Image (spheres, helix red, strand yellow):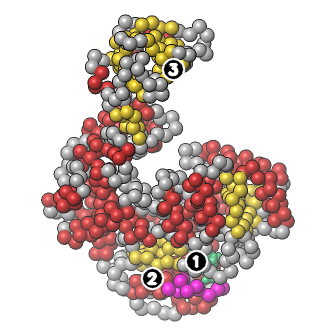
Amino acid sequence: MRPELLFPIYTPVRSLPGVGPRLSMMIEKLVGPNLVDLCFHLPNGFVDRRYSPSIVDAVPGSIATIRVKVLEHLPPKIRRLPYRVSCKDDSGVMELVFFHARKDYIEKILPVGQTRIVSGKVEHFKGNVQMSHPDHIVKASDVEDFLTVEPVYPLTAGLTAKPLTKAIKNSIKMAVPLPEWQDPAWLNKNKSPSWLEALHKVHEPENEDDLSPLAPSRKRLAFDELLADQLALSIVRRTHRRKAGRAITKHTELVEEAITSLPFRLTNSQTNSLDEILKDMAEPLRMLRLLQGDVGSGKTVVAFLAMLRAVEIGAQGALMAPTEVLARQHYKTISELAKGVGVSVCILTGRDKGKIREKLLSSIAGGEISIVIGTHALFQKDIKFNDLALAVIDEQHRFGVHQRLMLTDKGKAADMLVMTATPIPRTLMLCAYSDLDSSRLTDNPSGRKPIETRALSNSRLEEVVARLEASVHEDCKAFWVCPLVEESELIDIQAATDRYAYLNRRFPNRVGLIHGKMKGAEKDKVMSSFSSGDFDILVATTVIEVGVDIPEASIMVIEHAERFGLSQLHQLRGRVGRSKRKSSCLLLYAPPLGEIARARLNVLRETDDGFLIAEEDLKLRGAGEMLGTRQSGLPVYKVADITKHQELMMAARDDARLIIERDPTLKSERGKALRILLYLFSKDSVVQTLSSG
Ligand code: ADP
Ligand code: MG
């Protein structure tokens, strides 16, 4: 149960005064559902309102806070002209200017003859001093109260600064002191304030230094967040490890047989990874291993062979994919391979309903089916395995630690293999995924050719189409990707639909369309007709990013490539170049290209080494690049910054390990405080495993 100390900030955003349904919806979308999320929404700038000149002294262009007396209202004679209010102080006269103003409202906030404090940008216009749309107009006798530095927060479309700032201010007020969970030595060394002091301080920046990720208060909160994260991982790891695994040692020749019947030879890194996995499975501990490798590096085959080891002892293997399309892809690959060795495979997705589903469930529970492939539907409560020994999760970073654990809970001490197509930079691997052992697929299966990559301004669209024309005649297939802007899926789909229509005019009946709003069955149909050659060009939103194996596809066009993250572009590019054919990737961008976007496109042109690209991605993110973060596989923090706080991450990891070693159930005084920290960062389910175990 969440500690009572946190109740006040674990209150819904809409409970705040002045926050109605519309505003709360926007705030929730931007930061999250509770006041605590607002507390951790940190300013990225500030406005200094401490400058308080007289009207005549006010420097044009500056932000000034001035005490004035309202003289006269001057409503516009023509509608499109502004509403003006003339004011004065001892030095002179100034006009407040409002466009599209409502008369009654202006009269209410600026009554003639009264004194008001106004704050905003001072301008000189045709010899007059004026301030248009002051940021603040307040009743006040004492100007001193308003001479402050105001935090500026990141916003989202439709949300304005004032209500958000007010909501954040009110949220912080609800926070109460919490027992100290950090090591006193660390606090001393870093001159760190307490949690509550730090929280207040980060929202009151007075200069650039205060905004730095290394400012003591920001650093303190970042370390709190990282420690919570690392602690949660350590607990998960421990809980997982403590449940004894099963040693899968006895075996027949099934794996060897399957390897021989493969239509290709395993690469060296496939062989090595498989060895590592089988060795783990033979240990009496539970395996928790990450299999990292670029798109097309052959992870699925390795996973299949590992599952066969489970099948050999009469147990089962399960593979869970993040999307339906990808689940089907895996099913296609694996059922084919399994046929060769006479192993039964089925696919189970959310789409299977009624009788069919029941039948599948009973054969899974009865053990008639050895390998089950599915989407998150595999998590559902009604799914029982006869004897699940290996759970493979094709993560692609869409699942969290908790879901990983849920699937192994379905097996008797099942081993777990997590596959990821986004190579994780070494530094991050150490901290963010330190709970996992890892195998890397570094060499690509033979036959993969380097992909010629070019970046072109979108003004050269016609050239691209002409090139496509030539290629399609040579029997090539092409992907045409339109970007996903997270704010509005509908607009994206419109863009893709328009592009589809355009290309369809150029290549009648040779173009297909697939996007995220389509039903699963529809998507499958489009994919399979693309695969079987019903058309040559597939226009897609990023749904094709994960999965989709169309070996004949050799051209990848990506529109608005500047909007994608580096890893994402790399993944998309990996969809082609899967055959003997020479492949190309055309990155269309909308000029002018920003510095970071340019650097990103250059990296892609220069290398196709996923591990290298991941390192570069991390570096470029350092320059404040946020796009594609969610898809990138990098951990998402509210306060901590993965590029600036790597040392803190390492420290948090070491601390967490030490804490769990000394006080595994968090019973000590500090342990109790750490439990509060875990709840503060919403690691509720992790704390629950502590108490139950
Ligand atoms: P990943 O899951 O890592 O994206 P897959 O396992 O789907 O990659 O493999 C991509 C393609 O390469 C598949 O068509 C697969 O059959 C093929 N493949 C896998 N391993 C090899 C290999 N050693 N040699 C040749 N082709 C391979
Ligand atoms: Mg695959």
Q: Residue 545 in the image: x percent, y percent?
A: 60, 61
The residue at 37%/33% (across/down) is: 48
Q: Secondary structure at mark 2?
A: helix
Considering only order in the chain, which callout, 2 or 1, is on the residue closer to the N terminus? 2
Q: Position of residue 282 (x, y in %)?
A: 39, 87
- In the picture of the structure, the residue carrying the numbered disc 1 is 298
Examine the structure image and report whether residue 35 is included in the region drawn in magenta: no
Q: Quadrant of residue 452?
A: bottom right
Task: Tell me what residue is drawn at x 55 percent, y 86 percent.
Answer: 268
Location of mark 2 (residue): 277
Q: Whole-percent x and y of residue 189?
A: 22, 59
The answer to whether residue 590 is seen in the rendering is: yes
Query: Which is more N-terminal, label 1 or label 3?
Result: 3
Label 3: which secondary element:
strand
Dot 1: within a 10 Å radius of its alpha carbon, few (fewer than 14), some, or many (20 or more) residues? some
Callout 2: few (<14), some (14-19), or many (20+) C-alpha neighbours within 10 Å? many
Q: Residue at x 30, y 65 (%)?
A: 651
Q: Amino acid at mark 1?
A: Gly
Hey, which quadrant is residue 540 in on the image?
bottom right
Range drawn in magenta? 263-272
